[in-house]
Structure formats: structure tokens, C-alpha cells
Image (cartoon, grey):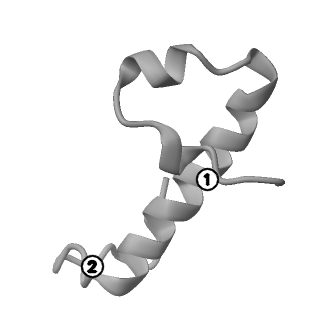
Amino acid sequence: MDMNLLQHINNPTDLRQLDEAQLPQVAQELRDFIIDIVAVKEGHKKRLPKNDAFF
């Protein structure tokens, strides 16, 4: 990924102005951002039983 597109998106209009080819990059940047935030925060206190699926 050449540049961080997510940092330039401030509202839905910014997102709509992206080329369709840029959307997978934005999606990956958003996934990475969410994972980074969740990794720092505690998240939910409830634990899933080991046999339950995560997704």
C-alpha cells in the first residue's frame, strides 16, 4: 500500500470520491486500524467457551 487513504477520509463524501480500485486498500486499512485499537483496549469481559466459534 503506497499511501494511507484512511487518514484522508473524514466523511462519507470523501469515501465516495475514491476510485473503486482503492476500496480494497481502504478496507484493509480500516481492518488494521480496528485490530490495533482492539489489541490495546481490554474489549469485552465475557469469554466465549472454547468450543464456540469466534465469528
| Label of residue 5 in the image | none
Q: Quadrant of residue 10?
A: top left
Please tell me which residue is depicted at 32% across the width and 73% down the height of the picture.
Answer: 48
The residue beneath circle 2 is 47
* Residue 6 at x, y percent in the picture: 54, 46
User: Which of the two discs, 2 and 1, labels the residue nearer the N terminus?
Assistant: 1
The residue beneath circle 1 is 29
Q: Is residue 49 above or below residue 33?
A: below
Which quarter shows the N terminus?
A: bottom right
Q: Is residue 23 left or right of residue 30?
A: right
Please tell me which residue is depicted at 37% across the width and 73% down the height of the picture.
Answer: 38
User: Looking at numbered disc 1 in the image, what kind of residue is underneath it?
Assistant: Glu
In this view of the protein, can residue 42 be seen by the observer? yes
* Residue 17 at x, y percent in the picture: 58, 15
Numbered disc 2: secondary structure:
loop
In this view of the protein, can residue 53 be seen by the observer? no
Q: Is residue 5 above or below residue 43?
A: above
Numbered disc 1: secondary structure:
helix
User: Looking at numbered disc 2 in the image, what kind of residue is underneath it?
Assistant: Arg
